[in-house]
Image (cartoon, helix red, strand yellow):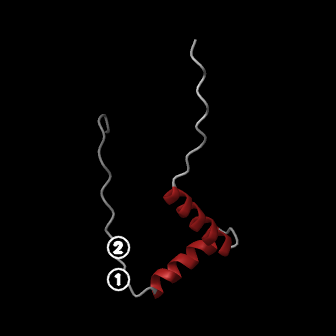
Amino acid sequence: MLEPLEPLGVWEDPIVAEVRAARERLFAEAGYSLEKLGRMLREAQATSGHEVIVLAPRPPERTRGAA
């Protein structure tokens, strides 16, 4: 009879871990307020010196059976 396999444990992706840590840090800086986080990110965007590109909204896609 075969022996059961040992559990491999949970694999942690280092990139995902880094992104999650950055998200937590930013959210903590904003006092866990989505409004404050949005203001902080817009301010950072405005002062970054990079051109901000705003695309026109795309028209909604028609689906089958739509009237």
- The CA distance from mark 1 to mark 2 is 10 Å
Quadrant in which residue 66 is drawn: top left
Question: Along the line of sight, which residue is nearer the eye, 6 or 29?
Answer: 6
- 65 displayed left or right of 27: left
Crowd band around label 2 with a 10 angstrom C-alpha radius: few (<14), some (14–19), many (20+): few
Classify 17 as above or below 26: above
Residue at the (40%, 88%) spot, across then down: 49
Question: Along the line of sight, which residue is nearer the eye, 7 or 3?
Answer: 3
Q: Quadrant of the N terminus?
A: top right
Q: Nearer the viewer, mark 1 or mark 2?
A: 1
Q: Quadrant of the C terminus?
A: top left
Tag 1 residue: 51
Classify 62 as above or below 30: above
Question: Along the line of sight, which residue is nearer the eye, 50 or 59?
Answer: 50
Question: Along the line of sight, which residue is nearer the eye, 52 or 5?
Answer: 5
Q: Position of residue 21 (x, y in %)?
A: 60, 64
Residue at the (53%, 63%) spot, across then down: 19
Q: Position of residue 50 (x, y in %)?
A: 37, 84
Residue kind at label 1, given as amino acid type: Glu
- The secondary structure type at the circle numbered 2 is loop
Residue at the (61%, 40%) spot, across then down: 9
Residue kind at label 2, given as amino acid type: Val
What label does residue 54 carry, if any?
2
